[in-house]
Amino acid sequence: MLDRLLNYAETSRDSFKTSSVGYGGDKKIDLTYRRSASLKKLGELDNELRARVQATLPSMFEQLCSASFEPTRIELEMVAHGDGAFFAQHHDTNMRPNRPSQRVISAVYYFHRLPKSFSGGVLRLHSIGGNGKEGSFVDIEPTNDTLVFFPSWFPNQVLPVACPSGRFEDSRFAINCWVHRQIASGSVRQNP
């Protein structure tokens, strides 16, 4: 699968678009907030990736201490982080009322060519501090062939990437996945 993902990324290079921020009709490009390239159409890999996410859900529920649920949607995108790429601190879910579903689990699968030709690109997961003070955080290296998952409302960011060659194929690649759950009528957020 790793080789197939790398091949798909490289052969789809011209289909990657500048990544946007926001939700639904509020999406926009803001290079001061997010700098990367993304691809929503994953061709023949799409169904297989969705099946792998579905098969991994019981482990995600268990490790996140969550009650299991049947997802209303599984959202996928492939992202390339080249030289200078980053994503400022954000939440992966939209907590506005009157939405039929919401992202509740975020997952990131990292892959790249070997030997690794970039540095940085660390995923920083921030704590949720209720005392008004700056919270603590955990940095997770984008290790090849690794899956990381966390609650979508955790503040997170991608620290800057350095890719001296500037070549697309030397980028830090990832499959981003968001598992959606139906929102109960009248509620703003449902924790897993």
Image (cartoon, rainbow, N blue to C red):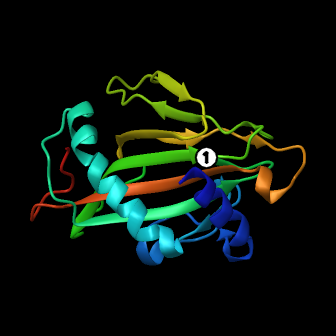
Please state the horizontal and vertical placement of residue 97, each as a whole percent of the image: 23, 64
- Position of residue 173 in the picture relative to residue 137 (left or right): right
Name the kind of residue labelled 1 in the image.
Phe
Q: How many marks?
A: 1
Please state the horizontal and vertical placement of residue 76, each as a whole percent of the image: 44, 63
In-front residue for pair 151/27: 151
- Position of residue 115 in the picture relative to residue 147 (left or right): right
The image quadrant that residue 28 belongs to is bottom right
The image quadrant that residue 51 belongs to is bottom left
Kindly state the secondary structure of the residue where label 1 is placed: strand
Q: Residues within 10 Å of mark 1 (few under 14, many from 20)?
A: many
Q: Which residue is rendered at x = 52% and y = 75% of the image?
A: 43
- Quick check: can you spot residue 19? no
Q: Is residue 192 above or below residue 188?
A: above
Q: Which residue is rendered at x = 39% and y = 48% of the image?
A: 106
In-front residue for pair 61/160: 61
Residue that lies at the very extreme toward the right in this rendered image: 165
- Position of residue 10 in the picture relative to residue 131 (left or right): right
Q: Which residue is rendered at x = 39% and y = 40% of the image?
A: 149
Instruction: Tell me the quadrant of the picture where the C terminus can be found.
Output: top left
- Quick check: can you spot residue 61? yes
Please state the horizontal and vertical placement of residue 183, each as a whole percent of the image: 16, 61
Please state the horizontal and vertical placement of residue 17, each as a whole percent of the image: 67, 72
Residue that mark 1 sits on: 111
